[in-house]
């Protein structure tokens, strides 16, 4: 009985595909970070494992989003985007390799 | 070699101090912005081609790309506002300084070229930031023009930081 309710309820709420009625896994979310005025906005993003982070370059100059050994967008021209999927928890500090004043952090929980 | 940096920076110092005498109008400000960018684009292209140290070449390429980006924003805005950039003594001084810098750099090669180019870039960007803060932003009448200069200022700060770090690595 409880199992049925759990499945029915989660059917209304969203997308729990688990037939055993266990607590729904949170949806992966997409976080957008814009590169503008030579900075990352927002500068700190908190994400869950499985979430995607998308950087979009809104500046008139190329930028990168680079975290050694984790991800490297390489040169992103204006209006280009780059996506990274967070696969492990932890704090990732990243920079723009062209503009040393440009720094950001992703906190993956 | 440092003399050329001062000649170049002199044009912008002029812009900064002349704020007391006569502020540039928006058409002149637009011209100064475009000229200042073009000067650095030209020097950057030369360094990308002629530099020896990999960081110097990369810096030159970045100058060419970034300042081209700023110029596109500035030109687009000038067109939108129907402002024709107006030539003025500050722009002329900048242009003359730029020509002199490039001529000097062309007589150099190897480590001497790299050092002279980077020395100039540090002085130049410092002078640009000073002019932006003391003259261009305070004098700009049109809000969009002012906002554009404010928006691009962090790029010049980033350039200055990078230039100092590259210069330090050459010593």
Image (spheres, helix red, strand yellow):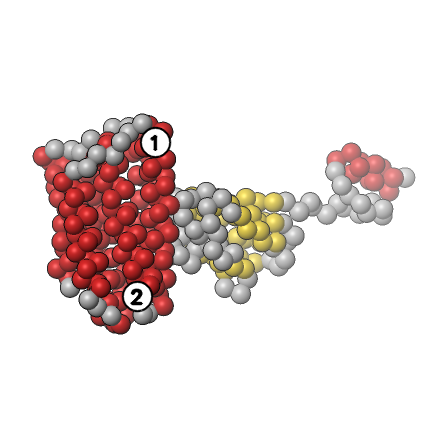
The chain containing the residue under callout 1 comes to B
Identify the residue shown where x is 63% and y is 57%. A87
The chain containing the residue under callout 2 comes to B
| Residue named by callout 2 | B50
* Structural crowding at the residue carrying mark 2, measured as other residues with C-alpha within 10 Å and reported as few (<14), some (14–19) or many (≥20): some
- The quadrant of the rendering that contains the C terminus of chain B is bottom left
Identify the residue shown where x is 36% and y is 50%. B66
Q: Residue furthest right?
A: A1
Residue B147, percent from left and from top: 33, 34
Q: Quadrant of residue B131?
A: top left
Identify the residue shown where x is 36% and y is 58%. B61
Mark before the other along the chain sequence, 1 or 2: 2
User: In front: B83, or B117?
Assistant: B83
- The quadrant of the rendering that contains the N terminus of chain B is bottom left
Circle number at residue B92: none
Cα gap from disc 1 to disc 2, whole angstroms: 35 Å
Circle 1 — which element?
helix
| Residue named by callout 1 | B79
Image check: A84 left or right of B96? right
């Amino acid at each position: 009985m409880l199992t049925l309710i759990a499945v029915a309820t989660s059917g209304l709420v969203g997308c729990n595909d688990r037939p055993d009625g266990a607590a729904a896994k949170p949806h992966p979310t997409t976080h957008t970070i814009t590169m503008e005025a030579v900075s990352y906005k927002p500068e700190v993003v908190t994400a869950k494992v499985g979430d995607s982070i998308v950087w979009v370059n809104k500046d008139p100059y190329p930028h990168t989003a680079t975290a050694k050994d984790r991800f490297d967008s390489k040169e992103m021209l204006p209006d280009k985007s780059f996506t990274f999927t967070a696969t492990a928890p932890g704090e990732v500090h990243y920079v723009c390799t062209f503009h040393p004043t440009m720094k950001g952090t992703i906190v993956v929980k | 070699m440092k003399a050329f940096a001062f000649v170049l920076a002199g044009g912008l110092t002029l812009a900064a101090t002349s704020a007391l005498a006569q502020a540039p109008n928006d058409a002149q400000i637009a011209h100064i912005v475009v000229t200042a960018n073009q000067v650095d684009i030209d020097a950057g292209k030369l360094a990308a081609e002629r530099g020896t140290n990999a960081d110097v070449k990369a810096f030159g390429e970045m100058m060419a790309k970034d300042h081209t980006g700023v110029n596109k924003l500035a030109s687009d805005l000038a067109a939108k506002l129907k402002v024709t950039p107006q030539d003025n003594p500050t722009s002329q001084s900048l242009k003359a300084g730029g020509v002199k810098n490039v001529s000097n750099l062309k007589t150099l090669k190897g480590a001497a070229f790299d050092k002279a180019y980077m020395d100039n870039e540090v002085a130049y960007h410092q002078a640009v930031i000073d002019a932006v803060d003391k003259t261009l932003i305070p004098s700009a009448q049109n809000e969009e023009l002012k906002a554009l200069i404010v928006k691009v200022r962090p790029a010049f700060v980033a350039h200055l930081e990078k230039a100092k770090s590259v210069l330090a690595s050459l010593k």
